[in-house]
Amino acid sequence: MQILCCWLLRWWHFTFASGYAFGSFQTMLLTYTSGVVVTTLITLPNWPFFNRHPLKWLDPIEAEQHPKPQTASSSSKKKASKK
């Protein structure tokens, strides 16, 4: 997701500069559209270099053994502060 955002941000800067330089809103929109298409073709397919370091997820049974910590309720804090 970070790669996608970085590429789109770069294209936005290039798009703004080209639209400003040419003074054309149409040029700006066409440049941005082509940037989105190129970014989509680069980042969305499941390319092998994205899977070089896969994440190891916990098994469902192991995740159940380690439950999430419970957050303290804020109502007891409010009652204590009123006294």
Image (spheres, rainbow, N blue to C red):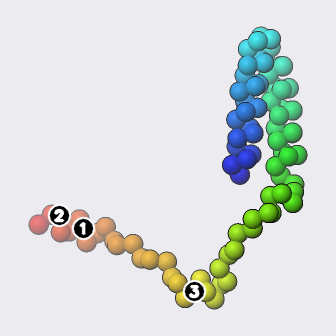
Above or below for 13 versus 44: above
Q: Amino acid at mark 2?
A: Ser
Which quadrant does the C terminus fall into?
Answer: bottom left
- What's the residue at 18%, 69% (across, down)? 80
Q: Secondary structure under badge 1?
A: helix
- CB contact under 8 Å: marks 1 and 2: yes
Residue 26, given in percent of the width and then of the height, sits at: 83, 19
Q: Residues within 10 Å of mark 1 (few under 14, many from 20)?
A: few
- CB contact under 8 Å: marks 2 and 3: no
The Cα–Cα distance between marks 3 and 1, rounded to whole angstroms, is 30 Å
Q: Which mark is residue 81?
A: 2
Residue 46, given in percent of the width and then of the height, sits at: 86, 59
Marked residue nearer the N-terminal end (2 or 3): 3
> How many badges with numbers are in the image?
3
Q: Secondary structure under badge 3?
A: helix
Q: Residue furthest front?
A: 52
Residue bearing the label numbered 1: 77
Q: Amino acid at mark 1?
A: Lys
**Viewed as shown, does residue 23 lie left or right of 58?**
right
Residue bearing the label numbered 3: 64
**Viewed as shown, does residue 23 lie left or right of 81?**
right
- What's the residue at 79%, 22% (across, down)? 28
Residue 21, given in percent of the width and then of the height, sits at: 76, 12
**Viewed as shown, does residue 9 lie left or right of 28?**
left
The Cα–Cα distance between marks 2 and 3, rounded to whole angstroms, is 36 Å
